[in-house]
Amino acid sequence: MHTVLKTSLSALTLAMLPVLQAQADDYSYPTLTPSQSDFGGVGLIQMPTGRSAREGEFSVGATYNDEYMHYTASLQLLPWLESTIRYTLVQDLLYSHDPSFSGDTKYTDKGIDFKIRLLKERYWLPETAIGVRDFGGTGLFDGEFIAASKHVGPFDFTVGVGWGYMGNSGSLSGDKANSIDCGRDTSFKGKGGSVEFERWFTGCSAVFGGFEYQSPWAPLRLKVEYDGNDYLSDFPVTQGDINMTQDSKFNYGVLYRFGSWGDARLSYERGNTWTFGFTLNTNFNDLKAIWQDEPLPAYLQRNTSDDRNSEEDSLSDADWQQLAQDLHQIAGYEDPTIYTTGETVTVVAPQTKYRDRNEAHERAATVIANQSPEAKEYRLIETSNHQAITETRIDSEQYAKVAQYEYFGAKVEDSTTVDIPDAPQGKLVAKSDKNWDFSLSPTLQQSIGGSEDFYMFNIGINAGANYWFGDHVEVGGSLYFNLYDNYDKFLYEVPPDGTDLKRVRTLVRQYINDNPVRMDNLQLTWMDRMGDNWYGQAYGGYLEMMFGGVGSEVLYRPQGSNWAIGLDANYVVQRDPDSQFGFFTEEVQYDPLTGRDYRVQTGAITGHLTAYYQPQWEWLPNTLFKVSAGQYLTEDRGVTIDFSKQFDSGVIAGAFVALTDLTAEEYGEGSYNKGFYISIPFDVMTVKPSTNRATISWLPLSRDGGQMLNRKYNLYGVTDARSPWYERKAMN
């Protein structure tokens, strides 16, 4: 009896284990996810940790105390790579000592950080990372670190070693008696922005560490930190005699999370300073489209006998026009041209709705099968700018098996073949008469961290129209309507830093602020597919807001390949901002407001040889490299490197740098041209599917070196369907 009862209780206990475990989990501590530091990037308070956020995590934030105001944007670009952009306003110092140049603008530091994960956390091993802070800025906060973090229950402990700004206390190594920074070179080359590898891991070094505690209440967590900096060599101290005495090596913080989209934090630092900050965040991999779309029609079962009607006129003209309309509305093939041989139906059109081409193929195949059941094959020739880019052939019998789910795992790809497009065959049965195209798009141009004002921008609307003469010649133009800008503060009339470049971009105020309505573009374009894998264009007219001229481009891009190479060459002249249609004819111009001369571009050749490569490396998934070498608008020569990463939602984040033969002194503040951008698919922001995108870009400064011509069309974008990048389907 007892044995039976004991056995029964044991069995009951085993049966109840999952329930007991579930109840224990219900009352366990919330998950401790990484949070941002004062400087941006995953960290404690002032110091970084060994942690990384989830891939695609994007955070923007601000931190304020009596000495600094940090504005940060941090992105977990890859599982092992974190990148951070930071702008810091030094509260007690001005941008320059010349009020006529920078007024009361506060001193602004621009910094770029990165962190590389070396080890993922294991049972015994901590998550370990190495990183560099402010490697591309002016050097106010530059430093390097190695940090390791380990979870223990609701605690996440960190210990690390810092150099430079993060190691200035010298608790590990360094001679503080003879130098506040242990002999580290804290100057910056030229005009800032240089990457100075020789100073990395030099000077003082110090141990830092701390822990983060996740309380049982999910929104609340606490932080305690042992600081590696002593603040004796901070910029306000050395340049402004500001008192930043450190009364305590320990910093204390509290963080309150607002669900999954942001947090607010308050910390007590140095034993005497309160700091407040907040962060807003999202994850680019998690963004999803929510559509209100045309429903996919039900597939009508076809007669599978071999007795087919092969007459070309089996459908009336009205039937073919209805088919064209349905392909437009349901499948996204805009204003298609249709040919038929009886056994084939060929559709020639651009795809404007679905980034997922399989979705477009399934919809098109269903529409054609329902309305032209005698066809054995459907040919979908996708075009862009009236040029054939790629062709998808769909076998009707195989698609019928897919549509009727005749086997497990049936999908539309089983019936399709994608290849180089051939010329359409058969009788023309439907053709769009629409040769005109109109567009209306908002425009935001911005520059951050300049001398005249921290944030310079203009917002407006571009209204465009174009007309195609056949399939190869287009005339088109656009007007820019300036709604609002603050470029009246842009005082870069004559370079105050000694540079004497031709003013190819720094005349922006005259074009925008002084011209609320301006012709942005007016050009004649010829475009052609010159061979199976060759595309070309030639153009002339007013090519952009600041330049006019003539040019051409040729691109070699094999079908389905992850690489391409192109060459563009242009002869341009700078447009006169005081005239809608005029050009500068004299290189030296006189400014009556300042009584000084400046130079403009009265004629130059500009162009680049560009290689495009989408690597197939496991450690760099979904990335694109663009490397361009050539001559720029101010006649400097060099290379532009553009790297971008695409996330599961289709959001693209990228950065570029242009390195030319200009010295840092010739270029001016910033040393070289660089910028960042985020490209967001329309269909994750709206309720309709679309292949269009919105791009937001950030330029640290508007300067004249390393500047390219803003061409209306780029053949790599025109031919995107050959190996989709901008129109790649969402992976989430």
Image (cartoon, rainbow, N blue to C red):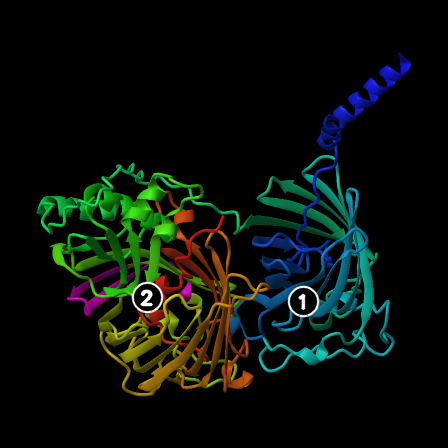
- At 67% from the left and 67% from the top, the residue drawn is 133
Residue 400 visible within the image: yes
Residue underneath mark 2: 718
Residue 580, visible in the rendered structure: no
Q: In the rendered picture of this protein, how many numbered marks are placed on residues? A: 2
Give residue 20's quadrant in the image: top right
**Which of the marked residues, 1 or 2, is nearer the chain's N terminus?**
1
- Counting other residues with Cα less than 10 Å from the Cα at mark 1, is it few (<14), some (14-19), or many (20 or more)? many
Outermost residue, right direction?
Answer: 2
| 266 relative to 727 in the view: left or right | right
Indicate whether 538 appears above or below 443: below
Q: Position of residue 41 (x, y in %)?
A: 65, 58
Query: Residue 235's image quarter?
Result: bottom right
Q: Is residue 377 left or right of residue 88?
A: left
Magenta region: which residues? Answer: 463-487
Q: Secondary structure at mark 2?
A: helix
Q: Which residue is at 79% across, 67% downward?
A: 167
**Residue 345 screen position, x and y as percent:** 20, 53
Which residue is nearer to you in this view: 127 or 182? Answer: 127
Task: State the SS at label 1.
Answer: strand
Closer to us: 620 or 574: 620
Q: Main secondary structure of the magenta part?
A: strand
**Residue 605 image position (x, y, % from top left):** 34, 86
Residue 8 vs residue 16, the one in the foreground: 8
Q: CA distance from mark 1 to mark 2?
A: 38 Å
Disc assigned to residue 133: 1
- Position of 86 with respect to 307 (left or right) is right
